Image (spheres, grey):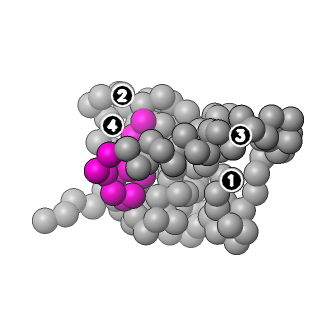
Amino acid sequence: MSTVIPPCFTVGGPAGVLSWAAITSCQSLEKGTAVDYLPENFRKFQSTYPAVADAYDRLEEQCNAAGPLDERTRRLVKLGIAIGASAPGAVRSHARRALEAGISPADLRHAVALGLTTVGLPTTVAAMIWVNEVLEAERK
């Protein structure tokens, strides 16, 4: 039996600041997907420090391959970590990447709601806003 978390939070809210995780997660997606751009600041960083940006990408690949978690689970875990860190850019980025991996809007909302008893109501409401912004942009 699955639980559906109703879209009870409104779309909108404060603009977030992109974290390093959110910025770097944009780069592997192709044009025309949920995220088809690199923020200008990351492009500047990448052109100034290409070896560092490349090493970071390789590190993410190694972390993904280091254990038994499948992609779906890794996506939800990363979303949860971003929520716990109260990182709006990372929450949006990981929500977009989760959608790209086939995770449903109901599953994303449920993952956000699960944080309530750990991170509290204000952080959970903010995360729901950020995820709903992504869902609205994707019309999900």
Marks 1 and 3 in Cβ contact (< 8 Å): yes
Marks 2 and 3, how far apart at CA: 31 Å
Marks 1 and 4, how far apart at CA: 28 Å
Q: Amino acid at mark 4?
A: Gly
Marks 4 and 2, how far apart at CA: 6 Å
Magenta stretch, residue numbers? 67-81
Q: Which residue is mark 4?
A: 115
Q: Which residue is mark 1?
A: 27
Q: Main secondary structure of the magenta part?
A: helix
Bin the neighbour count of mark 3 within 10 Å (Cα to Cα): few under 14, some 14-19, many 20 and up.
some
Mark nearer the viewer, 3 or 4:
3
Counting residues from the N terminus, which is met first, the one under dot 2 or under dot 3?
Answer: 3
Verify whether residue 121 appears in magenta: no
Q: Looking at the image, how many numbered discs can be counted on the residues?
A: 4
Q: Which residue is mark 3?
A: 53
Q: Amino acid at mark 2?
A: Val
Residue 40 visible in the current orientation: yes
Q: Residue at x 53, y 57 (%)?
A: 97
Q: Residue at x 29, y 42 (%)?
A: 114
Q: Nearest the camera: 127 or 24?
A: 24
Q: Which residue is mark 2?
A: 119
Q: Nearest the camera: 43 or 137?
A: 43
Verify whether residue 68 appears in magenta: yes
